[in-house]
Every structure is written in structure tokens, then in C-alpha cells.
Amino acid sequence: MKIAVIGAGSWGTAIAGMLGETHEVCLWVRNQELLKNLQMNYTNDCYLPGVKLPESVKFTHDLGESIESAAIILLVTPSHTVREMAANLSQYIKCSKTILVSAAKGLEFGSYKRMSEIIKEEIPIIAERVVVMSGPNHAEEVGRRYPTATVVASHNEDVAAYVQAALMTSFFRAYTNSDVIGVELCGALKNIIALGAGIADGLGFGDNTKAALMTRGLAEICRLGTAMNANTHTFAGLAGIGDLIATCTSKHSRNRWAGMLLAQGKTAEDIQTQTHMVVEGFRSTYAGYHLSQIMNVEMPITSAIYRVVYKNSSPRDEVLDLMNRSRTDEIGY
């Protein structure tokens, strides 16, 4: 089958390379200079250095050309560009049988909507064939063919199974899940906890600190998810604890790296200028905090990181405040 991958960042490049071994793949590239480099060398030195793509992968800057006759479209752009890209894609998607897979992790700034909600609004013709993909999937490792597992979620079980089959390789395993809300919330909110993990590392704390942070962080993500009708089992799976472990501990994690710089007194603006890749955790912190206020769900770790990022609060003071909160029960709250 033909698969279109929209977005030539690290994750889009890794997916295109992986699927290019078994499918006809066209990778849409926004940047013209990057496009020329990919066409000449089959490498993305800007976003995924050291990884050679199969010569079967095609590259284009023409959005219509990229998705022409594609059975599956993978949207792999930063979360803040998803609405714009979906609106652009709607001009070319005329077949209701087209499947669109969202591989972006985040919540929309201002509306706090999930990526699948945005896509369905912008491309209503395929509303019943939208799938979300999430899990512990560092592009650097998928690009190098390290064994990896992911989750594909859709309300349509047949569509999810179809995408699952298309993604499966000898080193990449996909599981299906019908809990779209839970999978998307996990993908967005774990970035907040990863900022916290980086802060803990930057302050020189140890494994006890990080383990507590990750566990209690997952608990508050699960509380919000439950309030939004997600399945609690999702948070114990690959999209939940799996992605949380990878993002909070990996050397590849941009959010953990950003948290370490926050601990040094850097601002979010300073940090974002130091990388050409998007630090999704900053936007997720804003959205997650305000969503918790709307849903009346207490999320103390998220609130603390929100104050660090957006209110210039001291990371060390926030840690002390978290440790001195009133006593509570672990399971009940």
C-alpha cells in the first residue's frame, strides 16, 4: 500500500524509514533545503543524523502529491501545527475511506482539545477513520531498528487493526486500544512529568525522587483521564507508564533536557531558542494545568511545573512545597 508521512522531523523521518522497507512511502517535507538533502543523500542530518533511509522512500514538498492514492496518512507534525496541517489536508482528502493517523502528542493551546478532535473538525469526511498513535517511541531508536512497541487507538476496531497490520515489522510491534481519550491524554501529559524529572536531575536529586515523581505524576494524569471518561487501564499500558518511563529517563528526551535547564534558572523562552525541535512539554504544561482547573481535578505536580514555567517560581521551592503538602492516602488520592 502507499503510506504518506506528513512531517520530516525526527519522528516523521524515522517512521518513513521504517515503513519504507515494506510499503510505498512518500514523506512530505516543509523545508526546501531539507528536501534537497533528503533527495540527494537519504539522510536527515538536521533532525535524525546517522540514519540512512531506504531509497524506496520518496520525498516531496507538494502536499497533494504526497497523499495522492495513499491508503494511510500519518500526520507527524508538532501539536501546535496540527490544525493548520489538517485544514490544508482537507483540500486534498476526498475519499471517506482514507485513514489518518495522528502521531502528534499534545493538546491545543487555548481550546485544550486533543489532536483527534481537531482533525475530525477540520476533515469531517474521515471522522470515523481517525487513529491516534502513541507510546515509548524515541525516533533515534526506531530509526536504528531497536525493538519498539506502540499503541494505535481508534473507536473503529477494524480501522485500528488495519493500521496495526501496516505498522508491524520485525522490530516494531503495534497494539490496538479503543480508548482514544486515554491514549491521547497520556501522550500529552507525560511531557509535563518529564519536565519535572529533568528538574529533579538538574537539582541533583536521586532515584528515589524520580521514582516518586513518576508514580505520583502518573496518578494525577490518571485522575484527569478518569474525569474525562478515559479507561484507567490505559494509564498502566504503553501509552501511559511505558511512555512516561521513556520520556522521564532517556537521554533522547527533549522534555527531560528542558527540565534540567529549568533547574539551572533558564526560562522556557531561553530553552526553546537552544533547539530547532519543539519542546512539547511547555505547551502541554499550560494546557494540562488549565484543563485540570476546568475539570476541577487536583494535579499538584502539574501545578508546580506550571508555576516554574509560567510564573518564574523557584524549582527548588516548588519541590519543597510538594513535599510539605498535607497527608493523604495513596490509593484513594
Image: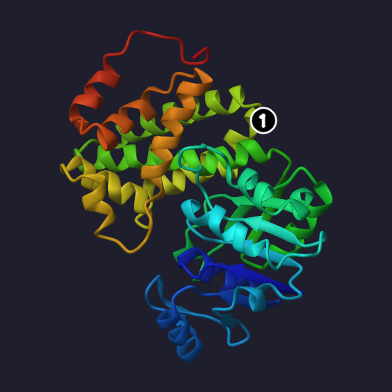
For the view shown, which residue lies furthest in the left direction? 265
In the rendered image, residue 44, in percent from the top left (x then y), is placed at 43, 77
In the rendered image, residue 177, in percent from the top left (x then y), is placed at 71, 43
Front position in the image: 267 or 218: 267
Q: How many marks?
A: 1
For the view shown, which residue lies furthest in the front direction? 91
Front position in the image: 268 or 96: 96
Q: In the figure, is residue 174 to the left or right of 257?
A: right
Q: Residue at x 68, y 61 (%)?
A: 90
Instruction: Give the vertical position of 281 relative to 329 (above or below).
Output: below
Q: Residue at x 55, y 61 (%)?
A: 76
Dot 1 corresponds to which residue? 231
Instruction: Give the vertical position of 70 relative to 253 (above or below).
Output: below
Q: Quarter of the image for the N terminus: give it.
A: bottom right
Task: Find residue 36 and report its image quarter.
Answer: bottom left
Q: Is residue 21 visible?
A: no
In the rendered image, residue 305, in percent from the top left (x then y), is placed at 32, 32
Front position in the image: 40 or 244: 40
Q: Is residue 241 visible?
A: yes
Q: Residue at x 47, y 56 (%)?
A: 78
Q: In the figure, is residue 262 to the left or right of 119?
A: left
Secondary structure at numbered mark 1: loop
What's under tag 1, amino acid-wise? Answer: Asn
Q: In the figure, is residue 265 to the left or right of 187?
A: left
Q: In the figure, is residue 273 to the left or right of 51?
A: left
In the rendered image, residue 311, in percent from the top left (x then y), is placed at 24, 31
